[in-house]
Amino acid sequence: MKALRTVFALGIDVLVGAYVTSACLFIIMPAMISDSISIPSPYGAISVSIGSILTLLLSVGSKVSLGRAVLYGQLPTGRARSIQRHLAWITFVVTVISGWIVTEISPIEFFSGQGLAGAGRIFGALFTPEFDIIGEALSAMMETVFTAFMATIIAVPVSFVLSFAAARNVMATDTTGRIVYVVLRALLNIMRSMEPIIWAIIFSVWVGIGPFAGMLALVVHTIASLTKQYSEQIEDVNDGPIEAISATGASRLQVLWFAIVPQCVIPFLSFTIYRWDINVRMATIIGFVGGGGIGYLLTQYQGLSRYHEVGMLVIIITAVVWILDVISARVRAALK
Amino acid sequence: MALLSVRDLRHTYPNGFSAIKGLSFDVTAGEFLVVIGLSGSGKSTLLRCINRLLEPTSGSITMNGTDVTHCVGEDLRRHRSSIGMIFQHFNLIGRHTVLDNVLYGTLGRTPAWASITRKFTKEQRDRALANLDIVGIADKAGVRADSLSGGQQQRVAIARALMQEPSILLADEPVASLDPATSHSVMKYLERINKEFGTTVICNLHFLSLVRQYASRVLALKSGEAVFEGSPLEITDEWFRTIYGDDAVEVEIR
Ligand SMILES: Nc1ncnc2c1ncn2[C@@H]1O[C@H](COP(=O)(O)OP(=O)(O)OP(=O)(O)O)[C@@H](O)[C@H]1O
Ligand SMILES: [Mg+2]
């Protein structure tokens, strides 16, 4: 266990060295000298190796180790601490400079006359929306809101059942339980880290472009998110009632239902309403990639450069999202 | 024959801490046994081994001649439902009504589905009301449990335990979060259940004055071992220092 920790910390130290040297060498230096310079790879490789060996030596030979600091909060004292602080600052500054270069931040373009004129045109169009499409826009918006609603409603019972199997305090009573818990948690994390937009692309190929594809994408993501939130709530319940209900001779199912569920219903409701709120926003974005609804309409008008129509759609989206946000916040506050 | 018989009981928690280190004692039906000892001496662990919320590491627990030390499944449910338990923090389901909380005392003998669909029988409901009447709060049957005061909540918890028609009632510091007057009222209900219904009570307590008043027998624990067993009247100053340490001073609760 201790050996494993040391290896992890050393790994991070080596990565920091390699990262800082390669960022300097392949991003910052080329940008400073000229755009086209390239370092012959043998030299590059040698320099990066030197960088990583340096941090490795620092970590092994002295107490300077960002890995130990990040993973276990172990900080050295005295001189080593000051060196370590400098190392952390160098890493940070190198990252900011590299980030600036990579994202092509350019104040010149931001404030150029031509650019500003273009932005002005579009803003002007957005503020003079085309009201003729209001019927079409509202019906697309309705589609989006219902997509989000159905996705939430379908996901809730699934998440409710899964969340018990994903709660440590419910499952950690025997080995099988622990295995189910670990596997389910891992699956949910993978499901959640795949953005809904990716699921939407998958499902729009599977069931065809339209609200159904968008809904399926949201269902998957909602199940993953709600199950995690629900199960964390379950892990947070007070043990007292669980003990008391168990002591009456209740079965495991009865303990879940009579001791755990009553402590969770209100937070569950609150999470669910918030999820629906989030899903309306996500359903809009998902529309861009074939999930139907107002997002899909938006990409069509944007592709035709019809910015007055786009303006109308943006106003409706903003208004509906804002209204739902206010309502959901109110309801959740009332539930507390 | 003893109602409950504990032999060389040991309990070690998963983290390796040994909380009970070889306890043997008998409990006869109708006793009011009080367990005392410093914080961490293993009182709660002992009670939880008796009703098998915890599984003993070794030794044996026999109740009515049946070995329950490692029972599982239906046997475990039956064992637990024959023992009522009340807690320092009452452990009611706060959002549910007082009557519902009392009805939950029947869960051990009700099939899961019948209880979830709330098919409690008329007989069970009547008995729940009668038990609430015994602890003097039948008028609160319809209110949410978390709207009651601490003393009232503990009485609901007693009614819930009575629903089990237990042969033993375990009480883990039942008055530790109550004021002195309320403490006595709750202890009086336990005493009454012990005297009138003949229910055996095993109760953890901190205050010796309460021990002297209510216990028929005392078991003192120190670091998971028995250091004293006998009548409350036999607890002399010397015993007191053995149980609680040389620097301890007795505090009274009246
Ligand atoms: N789940 C657990 N895991 C590990 N150790 C535990 C656990 N529960 C209790 N212990 C330890 O076991 C010992 C006995 O605990 P127990 O709760 O039985 O004591 P107690 O006599 O009831 O004390 P108190 O008067 O504070 O309630 C304590 O030292 C405690 O720290
Ligand atoms: Mg205790």
Image (tube, coloured by chain):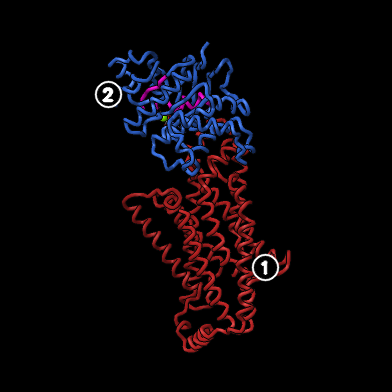
Chain colours: A red, B blue
A162 in relation to A101, above or below: above
Look at label 2 and name its amino acid. Glu
Percent position (x, y) of residue B29?
Answer: 49, 15
Percent position (x, y) of residue A164?
Answer: 58, 45
Percent position (x, y) of residue A314?
Answer: 55, 77
Mark drawn on residue A211: 1
> Mark 2 and mark 1: span between their CA atoms?
74 Å
The chain carrying label 2 is B
Quarter occupied by the C terminus of chain B? top left
- Quadrant of the image where one finds ligand 1: top left
Asked if one can make out residue A37 in the rendered structure from this viewpoint, the answer is yes
For this rendering, which residue is in front, B86 or B225?
A: B86
Percent position (x, y) of residue A138?
Answer: 61, 75
Magenta-colored span: B33-51
Judge the density around disc 2: few (<14), some (14-19), many (≥20) Cα neighbours within 10 Å.
few
Query: Which residue is the site of mark 2?
Result: B250
Residue drawn at x 46%, y 72% as measured from the top left:
A100
- Left of B145 or right of it: where is B214? left
